[in-house]
Image (cartoon, coloured by chain):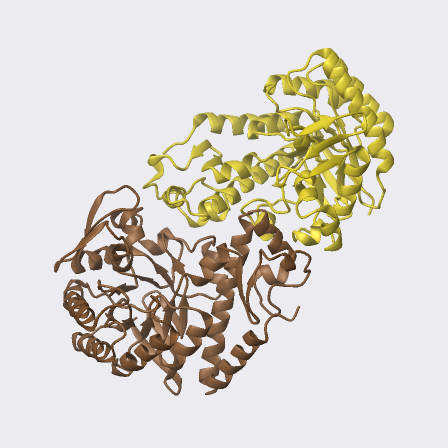
Chain colours: A yellow, B brown
Amino acid sequence: MSFGHQVLATDGAARAGLLHTAHGAVETPVFMPVGTAGTVKAMTADQVRATGAGLVLGNTYHLMLRPGADRVERLGGLHRFMDWPGPILTDSGGFQVMSLAGLRTMDEGGVTFRSHLDGSAHRLTPESATQIQHKLDATITMVLDECTPFPATPAQAEASMALSMRWAVRSRDAFVPRPGYGQFGIVQGSVFPDLRAASAEALTAIGFEGYAVGGLAVGEGQATMLSVLDSAVPRLPADRPRYLMGVGTPDDLLAAVARGIDMFDCVMPTRAGRTARGFTSRGVLNLRNARHAEDAGPLDEGCACTACTRHSRAYLHHLFRANEMLGPMLLTQHNLTYYQSLMRGMRAAITERRLQAHADEIRAAWAAGNTR
Amino acid sequence: MSFGHQVLATDGAARAGLLHTAHGAVETPVFMPVGTAGTVKAMTADQVRATGAGLVLGNTYHLMLRPGADRVERLGGLHRFMDWPGPILTDSGGFQVMSLAGLRTMDEGGVTFRSHLDGSAHRLTPESATQIQHKLDATITMVLDECTPFPATPAQAEASMALSMRWAVRSRDAFVPRPGYGQFGIVQGSVFPDLRAASAEALTAIGFEGYAVGGLAVGEGQATMLSVLDSAVPRLPADRPRYLMGVGTPDDLLAAVARGIDMFDCVMPTRAGRTARGFTSRGVLNLRNARHAEDAGPLDEGCACTACTRHSRAYLHHLFRANEMLGPMLLTQHNLTYYQSLMRGMRAAITERRLQAHADEIRAAWAAGNTR
């Protein structure tokens, strides 16, 4: 099975398709739950599958430190380790490492850092980041890049983007091709259209199985984020999948799919699930709120998850008030089910060439709010 | 459906049967997972069912304080609240209340205490404890008793037992009979055979749908606990179920079933599951131990749970080291599956009249220990 994105329908810039991989095909646009340390937090692998997820993300930074890439490799790779035979995308580790303020130093060759777990010294280079992801057996490997700090001056952003492009070349050289596996380049350039365009063109010239847009959702705001997509996406090859990293809210997903993005990941649904925030067709609810204490109705009418079909808002409220693990467990299931349902709805709407109307309906229901 | 215990087979003092209730029948001897606050910790109701559990326990003390018995009643009862249509036994709240050293005062009428949650004042009497369990819709209601402190002098134990017997009368008077529902009396009397015998006879004279042995597993040791069973169990009516409260280790269960106990509850498998201790056919393992770090084999050969069929010891080790919720989730599933499997094996052995040989085999495998 060769790796590739098969576009089955388009609606404006939006695309619906199939991403073929060594570990099976997934429908796009796709949302990837984040399985940071070899587990989507508070979920068994079966429960993740039951939400409709087909592709999950693993964090190289966390996995390289614990349990370690060599150990995962000896244990048969990340798929077997976490019981996820489907495709897995791993990030390069760069984003987490560069967030270690005071604990890391960068140079042309790579980044040296200390583990947040035990202070041990490590170094991540384009080559080692690629090799680690190979050991993890990632279906999709990401290049090591510098996630440009926000805000940045044009000169800072250009220097940072140029470094990322040099690293992209080295990451590509280090990648060991295997049938059905792919490597994605990452567009940088902060909020500057010319830099984003140049980055997209530089990556296309190198040639990857897919292309990501990175360095967004860092405080620039949705309008700016979307304008960056307008600069970058049209310059990426139409026959390759496009991945918007670390995004986002349900509204962000609607907006980015309309601009031609095929793949997303974000901790939002899982993190919110652990902090009592539920995404619903009527907007976001905080289950700790006292108004849910005696509400015998479901969290979200029509949702097929366990939290909604088997329990009341009152029960979820009780679980969070009592700090019971089942609260985060059920609400994470719900939020991921909601996100997958949102993606499924967009895929259908693209096929029917009515994505804009579909998005308008969804946004109107959010705006109408909770009716009880 | 009338409430009752149908003995289908005996092997010495041991019995295998069916406990018929308004919420369905369960096979005995039965182990009840503890669902303290309306949830078996770290488990969805479906996952609890998948372990083979048919009867679960709820804690009146926790539920009366949060979410409150009136609220549970308004929401349709504990079965609907926690998605457990099967039978539920609730304790009286007495054990937890009497553990509130310094926060409670006892008198003939009952016990006055302050909530550990917010310091609010509450009073539990035989009548109110019975009424609260009615509001929770408990299939099996327990009488309010005093759990005699250990150690106690014979005089202290006798006075405490006598109070519990007076409270048993009042609890029985307060119980509202419903078809398929039952109320259990609780034998007290500390470690003194004559007091235990007297308590068993006093309760039998009152007449309950079942009988519990309380006040054990409080530090007296297994040999003493079993001698108490020898004093009490023969004096309980053979046609009623017998429940050993708060017990115990797998070995305790083997020994107590051989002495005619039909029902058990204990936090051990669930608590151990949250602290990385796994019960297996080869004894107890601590999954945090470094020797599991690269062990690609299952936690327990032959176990049908998700932890054993889908993951390695190395993965469980990683999850606990990384403080991931999935560690407690998977290991709680395993430990409850192990306990249910232990009970199922004993039921079959009783039917085949080879319980002693079966218990010897199980103990020999524990003693042989882990072979890798």
Across and down, in percent, residue B268 comes to 43, 62
Given residues B290 and B333, the one toward you in this image is B290
Q: Is residue B312 visible?
A: no
Q: Is residue A210 above or below residue A70?
A: above
Residue furthest to the left in view is: B108
Q: Quick check: A340 above or below A108?
A: below
- Check the image and name the residue furthest to the top: A154
Front residue of A198 and B366? B366
- On screen, residue B367 versus residue B23, left or right, reads right
Q: Residue at x 33, y 66 (%)?
A: B218
Question: Can you give x and y, in whole percent of width and height, for residue A144 in the image?
Answer: 76, 32
Provide residue A229's location: percent of width, then percent of height.
69, 21
- Please state the total of marks drawn on the protein image: 0
Nearer to the camera, B207 or B82: B207
Please tell me in which quadrant of the rendered image residue A190 appears.
top right
* Residue at image point 79% right, 38% down: A128
In the image, residue B271 above or below residue B3:
above
Quarter assignment of residue A169: top right
Q: Is residue A247 visible?
A: yes
- Work out which quarter of the rendered image holds the C terminus of chain A and state it: top left
Above-or-below relation of B350 to A170: below
Q: Is residue A163 left or right of residue A222?
A: right
Which residue is depicted at the point 59% across and 72% down?
B369
x and y percent of residue A142 in the render? 75, 35
